[in-house]
Amino acid sequence: GAVVSQHPSWVICKSGTSVKIECRSLDFQATTMFWYRQFPKQSLMLMATSNEGSKATYEQGVEKDKFLINHASLTLSTLTVTSAHPEDSSFYICSATGQGLSYEQYFGPGTRLTVT
Amino acid sequence: AQSVSQHNHHVILSEAASLELGCNYSYGGTVNLFWYVQYPGQHLQLLLKYFSGDPLVKGIKGFEAEFIKSKFSFNLRKPSVQWSDTAEYFCAVRSKAAGNKLTFGGGTRVLVKP
């Protein structure tokens, strides 16, 4: 089946620093990748959608200058949380879909970000 | 805009009991429906999905769901749960009108007592 990985799985950073999270599709070409945020005991909230080679489309209320998304290749998308603050602490999950997958999204294992 | 509601936030039951989790969605057009499971410490996994055809969908691990268009519902069922079914379950809907984006329900935490 289609496999999506994320790195790192867990990161702690100091307030004011930036953190980059990688999302990779291991065995398929991901034409579209999605980034979600999941607060404790809550559901997944879509942050943005990125198509390979295009600018990401952000959901309402998501600051695009704070959450920089790059989808430069068909197997890699990155989310950079810039000038992180404690309220950015959350679980970030990516998913990917591609041609021949009936637009089904395959989810990565998530990255837990803690900002101190 | 599409939205999804899951009626139960927490469910506690004993092994061998039957499970039914409710899911209702708001969008009236053509939709694709999904149930995902998230085991403790693990990533989301697809349990089953409905695109078209037979409204009774069978998924992995003995789960099934029934799409009732008139009720905008897609309830998840399992006749006899096991301790290993302890997890969080998410219903999700996708439609072309919403740009093929997945909208998730709030999730239901299921605890199966041995």
Image (cartoon, coloured by chain):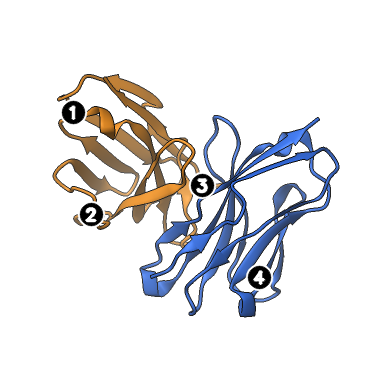
Apparent side of residue A18 relative to residue A109 in the rendered image (left or right): left
**For residue B114, what is the image quadrant?**
top right
Q: Position of residue A97 (x, y in %)?
A: 42, 55
Q: Are marks 4 and 1 in contact (CB under 8 Å)?
A: no
The one of A101 and A62 positioned closer to us in this rendering: A62
Q: Which hue belongs to chain B?
A: blue
Residue visible at 50% across and 63% down?
Answer: B93
Q: Which hue belongs to chain A?
A: orange
Task: Point out the tag, 3 or 2, that comes first from the N-terminus.
Answer: 3
* Number of the front mark, 3 or 2: 2
Q: Position of residue A57 (x, y in %)?
A: 24, 58
The one of B100 and A2 positioned closer to us in this rendering: B100
- In the picture of the structure, the residue carrying the numbered disc 3 is A2
Mark carried by residue B67 = 4
In three-dimensional space, the C-alpha distance between marks 4 and 1, rounded to whole angstroms, equals: 44 Å
Dots 4 and 1 on the same chain: no
Q: Which of the chains bears the disc numbered 4?
A: B
* Number of the front mark, 3 or 4: 4
Dot 1: within a 10 Å radius of its alpha carbon, few (fewer than 14), some, or many (20 or more) residues?
some
Residue visible at 17% across and 34% down?
Answer: A82
In three-dimensional space, the C-alpha distance between marks 2 and 1, rounded to whole angstroms, equals: 19 Å
Task: Point out the tag, 1 or 3, that comes first from the N-terminus.
Answer: 3
